[in-house]
Amino acid sequence: MKNIFIFMSLIVSALHFFFMALEMYFWTRPLGLQVFHMSSEQAELSKSLALNQGFYNGMLAIGLLWGIFKADMNITIFCLVCVLAAGVMGAITVSPRILFIQSLPAAIAIGLYILSMRGVAEV
């Protein structure tokens, strides 16, 4: 179960590197406009906010990798809880779909960790 938890945490990290790229590099390009359902004008007006948001997503991704490769589950769980909380805030303030795209994978990883701590058999 611990290996599945680590794998799921790596997926969450990869997702956040993808979010970072979308927000920092593709915000005003056709891919970003399509993903975020914005006009070019909206994207231009909000690109500095997106840059900041992308930076934070990159930090979450790096934090997850740090916890995983240092084998410090406290760091990994902390970063997953931050991802979960950020997704809930995004769902409340921007779009409910963020709950499924960002929070659900983190919640699954946290659930897998809890199961691994309870001694559930390795899968």
Image (cartoon, grey):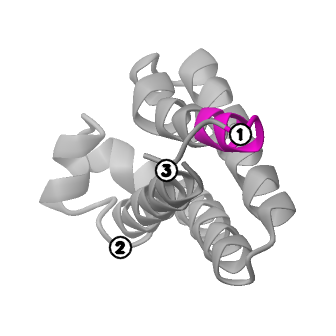
Give, as a three-letter code, the residue at label 1.
Answer: Gly
Give the residue at x 42% y 46%.
123
Magenta region includes residue 31: no
* Residue under pointer 3: 46
Give the residue at x 24% y 34%.
37
Q: Which mark is residue 25?
A: 2
* Residue under pointer 1: 119
Query: Which residues make up the magenta segment?
Result: 111-119
Give, as a three-letter code, the residue at label 3.
Answer: Ser
Magenta region, mostly helix, strand or loop? helix
Q: Nearer the viewer, residue 34 or 112?
A: 112
Residue with the most extreme front position: 121
Residue 40 lies left or right of residue 14; in this view the side is left
Give the residue at x 52% y 24%.
94
From this view, report whether residue 71 is shown above or below residue 89.
Answer: below
Q: Which mark is residue 3?
A: none
| C-alpha span from label 2 to label 1 | 43 Å
